[in-house]
Amino acid sequence: MKILTVKQVAELVQAKPSTIYAWAEQGILPSIKMAGLLRFDENEVIEFIKSCKRAAPCYNSNIQARARKGGKKTKWGSY
């Protein structure tokens, strides 16, 4: 078992350390409290990442994508 710090987990999941603290506090991301310091099991972090993976949408060639009418108006024009 490899133990990771908040900073290491933040780099791994490309999130801010404050987000990692929040996820741990909310029980979203499994964590370990050692001597008052928050630590993470690398295997559990990897499983967490895998659990967040979404399935790719199916592509149906019979359905045509339609452009939206109009666009969002800004003071510089539409986009």
Image: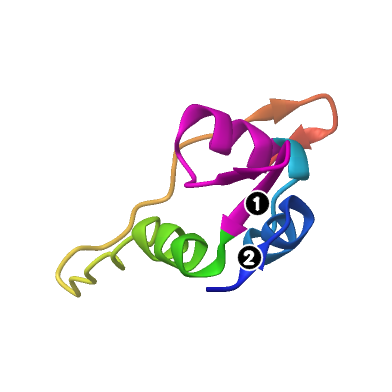
- 79 in relation to 72, above or below: below
First in residue order: circle 2 vs circle 1: 2
Q: As rendered, which of 30 and 63 lies closer to the eye?
A: 30
Magenta span has 26? yes
Q: Is residue 31 above or below residue 26?
A: below
Residue beneath label 2, please?
3
Where residue 44 appears, x then y in whole percent?
45, 61
* Disc 2 + disc 1, Cβ < 8 Å: yes
> Is residue 28 among the parts visible in the rendering?
yes
User: Mark 2: which secondary structure?
Assistant: strand
Front position in the image: 71 or 35: 35
Say above or below: 67 vs 76. below
Q: Mark 2 belongs to which amino acid?
A: Ile
Q: In this view, does 27 lie above or below 41?
A: above
Give the Cα distance between marks 2 and 1: 6 Å
Residue 4 image offset from top left, x and y in percent = 67, 63
Residue range (magenta): 19-40
Q: Is residue 30 left or right of residue 75?
A: left
Mark 1, residue position = 39
